[in-house]
Amino acid sequence: MASINGDWFHSRSSSNLDELLTVRKLVLESQRPAYIGFGWSGGRHDNVRMYELAAAGNIQPSTMQTKVRAMIRYGFIKDENTCPLVWTRMGSLWNDLYTGGNFSAARQTYELTLTISLAIYTFNDTSVQYSINPAIGGMPLKFLLNILDSNNSITLQEFEVLVDGHTRRVGENTSYWKRDLINSGLFHEVNERLYYTGKYPQFISEIKNFEPDPLLTDEDWLIIRDNPLVEISPFKNSIREIFEAIIQEQNIEEEITDGILTTPLVDVISEQEELEIPEIDILSSDSRFAQSTRRVRNTTWSIRIKRKYNYICAVPHCDVQGQIFVEAAHIKPDSASDGETPHRAHILNGLCLCRHCHIAFEKGYFSLTDNHKIITSPKFNDIPDQNLKTAIISSSDIKIKNRVDNRLPLIEFIQYHRVNRFKH
Ligand SMILES: [Zn+2]
């Protein structure tokens, strides 16, 4: 590749945060029941619903389509033609953090998503001009990183020649490309030069030396773009380290105000499966929005906990199982005030229990030891239900059932339950 074949996303839309915020409004609007199944990318002429959907972002339909397509290419939205618009794993993580007011972590997730997108999109000479599969075409970011001078910089003039040397849209692509590189946090501009900032050194060094596996299919790359931590992802280790650094930094600064930071990050690291909760009936008014978001988050937490236990009651001798028979129980209650670790949506603050065990646990008739074994209350005799008592009492001193990921509830949460809920 003699140049960066600059039809980079060839659109009038950019990766700026305000563009993503506009698309976020469209995502919410597209999840309203009236739009489910509606083809957002279709014809615009006389299409009343298309105008209504676009109006949620305060834009025209053509602009809406451009912006959504751009966010698909930047890796925030899934490539599907009908509503609802669905976040990718990375997009959803960004949205959770942003919605929860954790702007610092949200910003880092936004930058990381752009970096991944810039790293793996490639350009080629086919009519499509680009591919999501790096084995098909040249990798522009790899190319750029490898031609930087000894100061890790390139002049804007050289950059323009590179970007516009291979396209009909001379002059236009440079600004988009430059903006994307700066928005990703990888470059900054000083005195007519672009400098690599030194961000993500491990990941960047991998990109510079990356030789794509020709056996990975387009389908594989769609999966990797959606969740860069999946097993087949060539960058999973360095990206995992970046995530862990984000968590650490957040802990140090004590910026966490609730569980929203820990949950998606722990989650994205600990589980590879996909989980989509449509945020149906989130309306535009702000108070409704906040309330619905909390509800959606609780629902998401609850489904995740149940999945972790494979929908089986965690009490060892209780044999209740099945999606409709089990519930997610908070160990440290939702209503408890905040401690050191945000607990409300923490993935290690939950047990999957059947209805009966859930009530007994909530009322403190049994609890857990620090070794995750069942302890039962002497007050248990007050309960008339013999079946329930048998299952729990016979489980005494036995460790709770394993989660599919083999992780255990945090001792901090267990101790809270034992001290504040358990009937001694
Ligand atoms: Zn049970």
Image (spheres, rainbow, N blue to C red):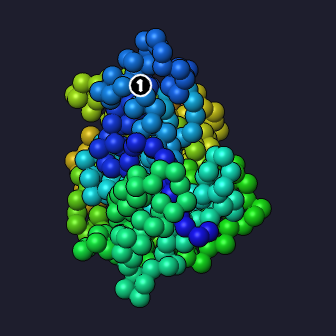
**Left/right of residue 40 with respect to residue 246 in the rendered view:** right
- Find the residue positioned furthest to the right: 215
Q: Which residue is located at x 41 percent, y 25 percent?
A: 61
Mark 1 lies within 8 Å of ligand 1 (Cβ measured): no
Quarter of the image holding residue 421? top left
Whole-percent x, y for residue 312 in the image: 61, 41
Whole-percent x, y for residue 34 in the image: 45, 15
Residue 41 visible, this orientation? yes
Residue 246 visible, this orientation? no
Q: What element does badge 1 sit on?
A: helix
Quarter of the image holding residue 217? bottom right
Q: Which residue is located at x 29 percent, y 27 percent?
A: 58
**Type of the residue with mark 1:** Pro
**Left/right of residue 206 with respect to residue 59 in the rendered view:** right
Quadrant of the image for the N terminus? bottom right
Whole-percent x, y for residue 201 in the image: 44, 78
Whole-percent x, y for residue 407 in the image: 53, 59
Q: Which residue is located at x 34 percent, y 63 percent?
A: 182
Q: Which residue is located at x 47 percent, y 62 percent?
A: 163
Q: Nearer the viewer, residue 155 or 177?
A: 155
Residue occupied by mark 1: 61
